[in-house]
Amino acid sequence: MPSIRLFEVGDFVYLRRRVLDSVLQIAAKREIYRVKSVHPNGMIQLQGKCGECLTNNVCNVAPCHLPDIDPTLDHTLAVPDKNLACEVCAFMDEEDKMLLCDGCGTGWHTMCLNPALFAIPKDEWLCPRCMNDGVSVADLKIRRAHMEPEAGPLLRGRPVPLFRDAVSRRRNQELVAFEGRTIANKEKVGGRLTSRLGVVRYLGARAGLKCFEAKMEDGTVIKFSAAEVRHRLMPAGTR
């Protein structure tokens, strides 16, 4: 039976390799993508760090559990598409020699330039059209310095946190399961150990360490951490 895969907007994922060269090869590719949308037919739209998007099937996607992923998009990492034609010769081959203009995004073969280039520039590169229009590398640096990081994807009209990986989402689901459960809080009153019952309410991940509050039998409200709630939980079905 196929395994169940649940992905949400904002998750970070890998793409699986279709063919493995050996049993020692890692099944997932090294590139990390961010989920932009998930469709009912099983198709999933992914976005790379360079900002480019692609569509694949959820069967070819694996969750990424790395906790320190930088979600900021860097459009300078974009590489020419295989179908991008050179502005001079109009051919799409020799993609390893295709330069991508940092100003307008058009493609130019190194050998088609006048004069031709014999090496790929390591820094920003502007095509002849941009240079003729008066665009300079200094203009690019000024524009990038004022660029604001792109907001996260929207889900039902609200931005989704970018660091909600599968691990944090699973932990949040476990804590939500404590909602409405009964706990027994033992306290010393007048030298005697007494136990009071209370009903738990989950305050959400943003509430910090004390992410639960319990309304006790006498109407008082006490906040607890997840570990404290687990320690005080009554058996399921207890009221």
Image (spheres, rainbow, N blue to C red):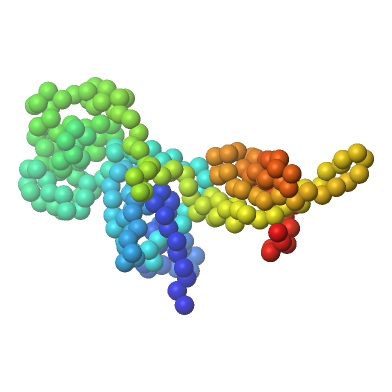
Q: Farthest front residue?
A: 218
Q: Nearer the viewer, residue 10 or 221?
A: 221
- In percent of the image, x 66 and y 56: which residue is there? 181
Does 187 sit left or right of 19 as displayed?
Answer: right
- In percent of the image, x 28 and y 47: which residue is there? 52
Quadrant in the rendering for residue 37: bottom left
- In percent of the image, x 27 and y 22: which residue is there? 142
- Residue 110 seen in render: no
Does 160 sit left or right of 176 as displayed?
Answer: left
Question: Residue 7 location in percent, x, y?
Answer: 42, 58
User: How many discs appear?
Assistant: 0
Does 36 sit left or right of 25 as displayed?
Answer: left
- Residue 51 seen in render: yes
Q: Farthest bottom residue?
A: 1
Above or below, comparing residue 49 to residue 58 in the picture: above
Question: Residue 160 location in percent, x, y?
Answer: 41, 44
- In percent of the image, x 22 and y 46: which residue is there? 80
Q: Farthest left residue?
A: 89
Does 110 sit left or right of 225 as displayed?
Answer: left
